[in-house]
Amino acid sequence: MNENCLFCKIIGGSIPSSKVYEDEYVYAFRDINPQAPVHVLVVPKAHIASAAEINTDNSVYVAKCFEAITKIAASEGLGSGYRVITNCGEDGGQSVMHLHFHLIGGVKLGEKII
Ligand code: 5GP
Ligand code: ZN
């Protein structure tokens, strides 16, 4: 955990969030500024700064995030599809430096991603 990190504070409960899912490795909550009817942020409980920091020692957290995404997509009624996005670094548009996956759905999304 990183005491200066917004998402570590959300995981720890010192900043409130709308929790969607939680297990030993993963915390998921609704984005405060949703871009679609369903917009959930899926975050590892370990402080990994971005996708650029994934390595052999911490990649289990990434796998657990994707296992959680499968479950959340089902519980959110996204059976006809959804999109998973991670922004990485300054040019990737990342604003919170704790790895997170945007799970977006509930509407038919366009084929283009940018
Ligand atoms: P990024 O731009 O880093 O990929 O995504 C960060 C996301 O975190 C944004 O979609 C933003 O709306 C969301 N966000 C920022 N601060 C908060 C917060 O305090 N609570 C919640 N639930 N979402 C937040
Ligand atoms: Zn963090």
Image (spheres, rainbow, N blue to C red):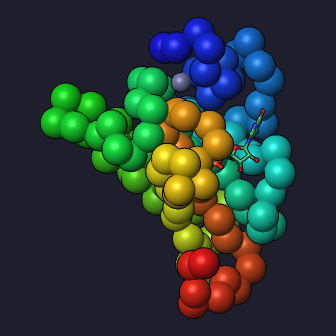
Does the image show residue 44?
Answer: no
* Image vertical order of residue 15 relative to residue 55, above or below: above
* Residue 54 visible in rendering: yes
Residue at 78% x, 64% y is: 35
Q: Residue furthest front?
A: 91
Residue 18, horizontal then vertical, whole percent: 78, 36
Number of numbered labels in the structure image: 0
At 77% from the left and 31% from the top, the residue drawn is 17
- Residue 42 in picture, x, y percent from top left: 55, 44
Q: Is residue 64 left or right of residue 101?
A: left
Q: Find the residue positioned furthest to the bottom.
A: 111
Image quadrant of residue 32?
top right
Residue placed most toward the observer, 107 or 110 = 110
Q: Where ligand 1 lies, by quadrant?
A: top right
Residue 11 lies, with reference to residue 82, above or below; the image says above
The front one of 77 and 100 is 100
Q: Residue at x 52, y 57 (%)?
A: 92
Outermost residue toward the left in this view = 56
Picture layout, residue 95 above or below residue 72:
above
Give the left or right position of residue 37, taking residue 94 as reference.
right
Residue 71 in picture, x, y percent from top left: 50, 54
* Quadrant hosting residue 105: bottom right
Where is the C terminus found, in terms of image quarters?
bottom right
Judged left or right of residue 93, residue 17 is right
57 left or right, relative to 64: left
Taking the spot 77% from the left edge, 19% from the top edge, the residue there is 15
Where's residue 72, x and y in %?
A: 57, 54
